[in-house]
Amino acid sequence: MRAGTPAIVTGEARYSGDCRKEGMLFARVARSPHSRALITAVSASEALALPGAAAVLIASDIPGENLIGMTGKKHQPVMAETDTRFMGEAVAVVAAETRAVAMEAARSVRVEYEPLPAVHSVEESMAPEAPRLGPEGNVAWQGRVTRGDFERAAREADVVLTGVYRTPPVDHAYIETESVLAEPEVGGMRVWSSSKNVHLDQREIARVLGWPKERIRVTAPTIGGNFGGKPDLPQLCMAALLCERTGRPVLLEMSREESLQVSTKRHPVVFHMTHCADRRGRLLGVKMEAYADAGAYLDYTVPVMQRIVIHGAGPYRVENVLLEGWGYYTNNPLSGAMRGFGVPQVTFACERQMDRLADALGLDPIDIRIMNALQTGDRTATGQVLESPVGLGEALNKARELIPAEEWTGSQEDTSHTGWGVACFHYGNGLTAMPNRGTAVVRLLEGGRIQLAIGSPDVGQGSNLALGQLAAEALGLEVSHVEVLSADTSLTPDSGSSSGTRVTYVVGNAVVSAARSFGEELAQRAAAVLGTDRAALSLELSAGRPVLRSDNFEFGLAELYEELGDQERPLEVTGTFDPPTTSLDPATGQGAPYGAYTFGVQLAKVSVDHYTGKVGVERIVSLLDVGTVVNPLLLRGQVEGGCAMGIGYALLEEIELQGGRVVNDNFDRYLLPTAVDVCDVTLVIIGAADSTGPYGAKGIGEPATIPTAAAIANAVSRAAQIDVRQLPLSLERVSAALAEREEGGFR
Amino acid sequence: MAQKQILELTVNGDLYEIACEPNITLLEALREKALLTGTKRGCDLGACGACTVLLDGEAVLACLTLALEAQDREVTTIEGLARNGEMTPLQQAFVDYGAIQCGFCSPGFIMSATAMLADDPSPSQQEIRRRLAGNLCRCTGYAKILKAVEAVVEARARVSAPAGGAL
Ligand code: FES
Ligand code: FES
């Protein structure tokens, strides 16, 4: 559910690929067929000579800077100029009267390449003889979080357990591929982008065009899914470049094959974990070395790796941690931001370790987690004191009550085993260890309408509705009295991105603050107009209509609007919120990176077929501490969708790369969970209001998917008595493990 | 390039004369020529179901169907379901049950489910799952979509049971 659903079910909603404009050109990108090569010559003349071809642009045609990035790191070119670094990287872009001509023209751009040796894994990138890929070598990022003395903890521990875990690259696989429409407007340009941050889009386009950003207006139409992956910045900028060059509207779409080849992926990571505990199962120390494939350019590897090291010990109280991470450049497609920002990966590694530790000590997997779970007042791995209520322990206790012990251990049938698995997680809301202010504007419009304007797009999760509810609550009105407008650089303030589980928590706080000040402002203006005392007036509903009421009269908002002077209209109030965070100490990673954390426990029941290795997920129970629930239906939608994505991550999905080429580049071979692969999800809400969230609310977008794969991996390990170290749990991988188990004898 | 020809398509009861190459797909004809963009393209390969439309009442994938094959037949798209602004019970249920997040998959699901219910007015839960397994949704995890369809099936059963009597 989201605002505007009727238009969606009648087919009227416009997504960016649905817009058609007078005189519109179709664009197509000419892409590198090499993972790594020098560009020695480019010729556009043949392409330009085709009847119907309107423009061909290459890197040297870019009037501004040919460097872009979703984060502070502007490292990737819009189009490669001297060399290409991953397969499918843009080299030229063409616009033509029809799609067919555009396709033909893109094929006719002549590019001469001198292929260079390419690097396709972290291991290859680390090798001393590896070609140098990045400006400072092949390490794209390194960092650590350290506290206490891990080595001493390891010496004093009763058990030291190590393990290596691997996670695959996967795609966001939004069903709408990336598309952008750019059209000329008087004095500038209008761009339609299915983005998570239109204000960032505007700044990036402006730098590339060399224009002041005010000349560019970016609007998000209805967005067909995002999950961290849109926009594709090179595509966005190429559409704008073509529009500037031709003076005509330009539509640049990606095919599914292009999208799977060139869009960013979830970071594949190899984890080396060491857990130290005493005999009773109390964690004494955790050490992690995480090696991630950054792909060809840096960008999102910075915040993803930061998240991985920060969350590297799991949601547990551990005095001694040494959590280190490295991102390595390769010539694979870029790794980027995908729902969970590295935390689904690290949760898989941590939670397998916790289960193995429980097994080694003969403990129950829930008991060992209860014993170590972070509680209110504890310090996290970065030394941050958790001052808001932490519902993790309660969630674990509840989990135990829900599943009877005899069901927990599972059953062995002739052809299959069943069993339960558990995983815990925590997730910092908002961007990591940096200011990330949310801004909201509330306006009084003609007719007494109240408008809430926020820059962060509704990417399908329903944020417009949830934020409208928060505004209505703060105003003491119904949500139907608040019109929500989002994601338009001309009409909405820069609220930052719809990512990092920051919308409810960060932007929501800004909305509440704006709405409260707006209510106050209305009362003051009305008092001035009426010549009464402010204190005598309050904003209330009368016959379903918002009015300012005193003891003996009502004053409607439409009337108030009419009484305002011209310069006072529209009456508008801005609210902001920046979460209370600190930067992290560069040497130790200590600090307070987030203002709030979402906590949770997930239980998964699986069946594993002996013969085929097929894993079925039969039930999921998700116990969440999200603070106050803003909208139960939206929350449930996030959890159900997140679980399905987690099932895909656990069982089905893996981008298969051969020499940098995505082999499974459409949905016939890149398999997503369907309606027959998902199961019932029981949702249990735990915990108390957060002390910093809007009305105590915390975010759910990313946490929804974080623990699922880990819980399934633990369930499969338990049910089939195998030791899962790698995702996905494909038929081949599970049946190989079952065969190995048979050979090695039953455990 | 192939010779253009004039194709006559009846979509949602309206006649469209489309000048096009003979090999274009129904999906292209609908989206690019008839400008009915409610039918979505997710894969162009028959693997996602986003382009599902009805051809003489039967669900087909428009990306795998030639526009030519649809001549002299009745094409129904998502735009053709609501009559005089009134949504079908399925459309309404998708809204009421929160079966929509980004909504990109919704037209395809609604068309598939419409065809399924025309075929079999009382499918079991398992059948609903199976018959909708050709439609991908990345957002909802399917639960609310299945619920919306089940709700329509149940509502119909309530209406028809007393009249039919014999169940
Ligand atoms: S677009 Fe036709 S099935 Fe995907
Ligand atoms: S609602 Fe987004 S793909 Fe189904």
Image (cartoon, coloured by chain):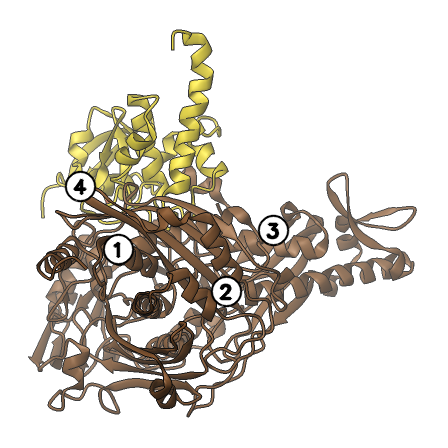
Chain colours: A brown, B yellow
Q: Image height check: is B29 above or below A379?
A: above
Q: Residue at x 23, y 90 (%)?
A: A137
Q: Chain of mark 4?
A: A
Q: Which residue was labeled with disc 2?
A: A598
Q: Along the polypeptide, which appears first: circle 1 or circle 4?
A: 4
* SS of the residue under disc 2: strand
Residue A280: tell me if it is visible. Answer: yes
* SS of the residue under disc 4: loop
Three-letter amino acid code at the position of disc 2: Thr
Marks 1 & 3, CB-CB < 8 Å contact: no
Same-subunit check for callouts 2 and 1: yes
Is disc 3 surrounded by few (<14), some (14 to 19) or many (20+) residues within 10 Å?
some
Q: Position of residue A140 (x, y in %)?
A: 28, 84
Nearer the viewer's eye, disc 2 or disc 4? 4
Numbered tag placed on residue A616 in the rendering: none
Marks 3 and 4 sit apart, C-alpha to C-alpha, by 59 Å
Three-letter amino acid code at the position of disc 3: Glu
Marks 2 and 4 sit apart, C-alpha to C-alpha, by 41 Å
Q: Which residue was labeled with disc 3?
A: A483
* SS of the residue under disc 1: helix
Q: Which of the four quarters of the rendered structure image does ligand 1 lie in?
A: top left
Same-subunit check for callouts 1 and 4: yes
Q: Which residue was labeled with disc 1?
A: A716
Three-letter amino acid code at the position of disc 4: Asp
Marks 3 & 2, CB-CB < 8 Å contact: no
Three-letter amino acid code at the position of disc 1: Val
Q: Which residue was labeled with disc 4?
A: A414
Nearer the viewer's eye, disc 1 or disc 3? 1
Residue A706: tell me if it is visible. Answer: no
Nearer the viewer's eye, disc 1 or disc 4? 4
